[in-house]
Image (cartoon, rainbow, N blue to C red):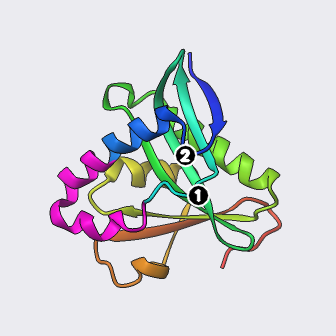
Amino acid sequence: MISLLRCSSDHPGFVHLVSLLDADLLARYSQAQEFYSQFNTLVKIRHVVLGMEGEQAVACGAMRELEPGIMEIKRMFTLPEKRGQSLAGQVLEELEAWAKELGYGKCVLETGIHQPEAIGLYEKKGYSLIPNYGQYTEVDTSICYEKALNKSLKQD
């Protein structure tokens, strides 16, 4: 059974999962991953959710403030042998709940065109495709999504 743990980016389980995520992304995107790495540092990420099986971190996700009222979902990953068990969905839902508790009205995220499992998750969880934002604006391997956290909040 999975439990969800709220922590920060210095948790050893998160650090380990992110190292596996980075290796996975390097395999999918090769040298293009160097561009993304500059935006994926763990410094100052205060909002991390770990999916835990006992003492082992098996899934993770994080968020950071992109701008007032908007959280950006980052560093979503599930161990390959644990995929297909809705763990990423549980982590994402916990991040959204935490963002709402903190007063944020929207989550945005960037994922890559070579990550169909991530795209499927975000679309299943109600995220809508948006034009690429920020540093991803001109990146053809990136796709971006958003989701309003409050029904009364109108999506841009």
**Residue 16 falls in image quadrant:** top left
The kind of residue tagged 1 is Lys
Placement of the N terminus among the 4 image quadrants: top right
Provide the secondary structure element on which disc 2 rests: loop
Give the side of residue 27 with respect to residue 90, left or right: left
Label 1 SS: loop
Return the residue at label 1. Answer: 44
What residue appears at the point 52 percent right and 57 percent down from the top-left corner?
A: 43
Q: Is residue 142 above or below residue 86?
A: below
Q: Residue at x 80, y 55 (%)?
A: 102
Q: Main secondary structure of the magenta part?
A: helix
Q: Nearer the viewer, residue 8 or 145?
A: 8
> Left of 50 or right of it: where is 28?
left
- Is 129 colored magenta in this rendering? no
The kind of residue on which mark 2 rests is Ser
Task: Tell me which segment is drawn in magenta.
Answer: 22-40
- Examine the rendered structure and indicate whether residue 20 appears above or below residue 123: above
Say which residue appears at 41% left-offset and 83% top-offset.
137
The reply to whether callout 1 and callout 2 are in contact (CB within 8 Å) is: yes
Estimate the x, y position of residue 93 in percent, counting from the top left. Answer: 64, 43
**Disc number for residue 58:** none
- Seen from the viewer's position, the closer of residues 72 and 128 is 72
Compared to residue 99, the image places residue 32 above or below, namely below
Q: Quadrant of residue 26?
A: bottom left
The image position of residue 61, as x and y in percent, is: 52, 45
Q: Is residue 23 magenta?
A: yes
* Quadrant assignment for the C terminus: bottom right
Q: Residues within 10 Å of mark 2 (few under 14, many from 20)?
A: many
Which is more N-terminal, label 2 or label 1? 2
Q: Give the labeled residue for mark 2.
A: 9
